[in-house]
Structures are given as structure tokens and as C-alpha cells.
Image: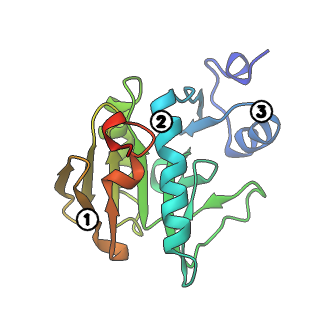
Amino acid sequence: MALQDRFETTQYSIADYLAAERIAMEKHEFLDGEIRAMPGARKEHLRVTPQLSAFFTNEFEDGPCEYLDSDVKVWIPSKRIFTYPDGAIACLPEWSDQDATGILLNPKVIFEVLSPSTEAYDRGGKFRSYRSLTTLEDYVLIDTSMPVVEIFSGPDWVLKTFEGLDAVAHIPSVGLDLPLRRIYRKTFAASKS
């Protein structure tokens, strides 16, 4: 029986969620007492996320900031939400002592790789929840149907859009430039040399 089948309509505590998540085979979000299975990733998503990880791991080899991949859980206390972004950057990461699985408390940048099944949520409810994090400074959306990166920068969440393989997306909070050709190198045939 999948974990989702056990959590259809009942409200659960944070302790229930964390205990179940430790033994689950798939990832789940905790949304103020509800537990929801996260959808599996599409192949385009699976091509972009490792490129992000490789790029930022190299960029942050030295210094206080680090890139954390989609296995990191983020706690949004004001909304009582645990969720897994597709990536996050934290400088001097702070971790919750509620669970040993890695609950990040202070993301500075959050990345979501868009797919047809998650785009509305990533742009809507999830973004509204993320904005309540006092440490969050940039929210980065990465399209998988075309080479487009959108960066919302707080506190007013001003949008900057970067389009095309030759574009370079600037992430203000960490002062880094992200070449779109680098993250889309396995996604679009035109980017292969």
C-alpha cells in the first residue's frame, strides 16, 4: 500500500508526517495536516536538475553558501508546510532538529523546475507559501518546454525573465550568473555542439 493511500482524508500531526516520511518510498508534502504524494519527474525535469546541481556545487566549492538538491525538505512555519523544492541555496544552512532527514530552515534561493502537472501550483499556492519565508530572497522558475528562466526577487517579488540558450540569468541574492546553455545542455538539441 502506498503511503498516499494511508493519508486520504485524515488530518495528521507533524510528528505523524515525519515518521511516515522516514519509511516512505516516495516523497510527500505536508500541507497543514494533509499529506500529499509528490508527482514523479518527467525526463526533461530529470535532465535539468542535475545540471543545476553540478553548476552550483562547483560555484559554491568555497564559501558559506551551498546548493541543496531536490532531496532537501523545506519547512514553512507560518503555513505549516513541509515541501521539497527542486533545489535551494542556503548560506550557512540552518537545519531543524525535528528530524534527521534534512529539514532546511533558511533557504535564500528556491528553484522549481516547471512541468505541466506542477506549473500552476509552483506559480500560485507554492510561491505564496514560499514568500512567507523571511530568508527567501529569490524564487527561480525553470521552464522545461523552452529555454526560459524566471527569477522573482523579494521583497517586492519583481520578475525578471531570461530567454534563449544564450541568455544568462542573474541571481541577485547570491551574485551569480547562471548561463541557460549550461542548465539546458541535455534538454534541447540546439544546445549540443
Callout 2: SS: helix
Which comes before the other along the chain, label 1 or label 3?
3
Q: Amino acid at mark 1?
A: Gly
Gap in angstroms between the C-alphas marked 1 and 3 = 35 Å
Write down the quadrant of residue 156 in the picture.
Answer: bottom left
Question: Outermost residue, right direction?
Answer: 23
Q: Earlier in the sequence, mark 2 or mark 1?
A: 2
Question: Which residue is tagged 1?
Answer: 154
For the residue labelled by badge 1, is the local secondary structure a helix, a strand or a loop? loop
Quarter of the image with the N terminus is top right
Q: Secondary structure at mark 3?
A: loop
The residue at 34%/56% (across/down) is 139
Amino acid type at circle 2 is: His
Vertical arrangement, residue 8 with respect to residue 103, above or below: above
Image x and y of residue 153, in percent: 25, 63
For this view, does 125 lie left or right of residue 148? right
- Residue 79 can be seen, yes or no: yes
- Per the image, the residue denoted by label 3 is 24
- Residue where numbered disc 2 is placed: 45
Q: Nearer the viewer, residue 73 or 17?
A: 73
Q: Residue at x 26, y 60 (%)?
A: 169
Q: Residue furthest bottom?
A: 63
Q: Residue at x 43, y 68 (%)?
A: 108
57 to 73, vertically: above or below: below
**Left/right of residue 128 with respect to residue 45 in the rendered view:** left
Q: Identify which residue is drawn at 73% across, 59% down.
A: 98
Visible residue check, residue 80: no
Mark 2 surroundings within 10 Å by alpha-carbon count, few (fewer than 14), some (14 through 19), many (20 or more): many
Of badges 2 and 3, the one in the foreground is 2
Q: CA distance from mark 2 to mark 3?
A: 22 Å
Q: Tell me which colouring the rendered structure shows.
A: rainbow
Q: Amino acid at mark 3?
A: Ala
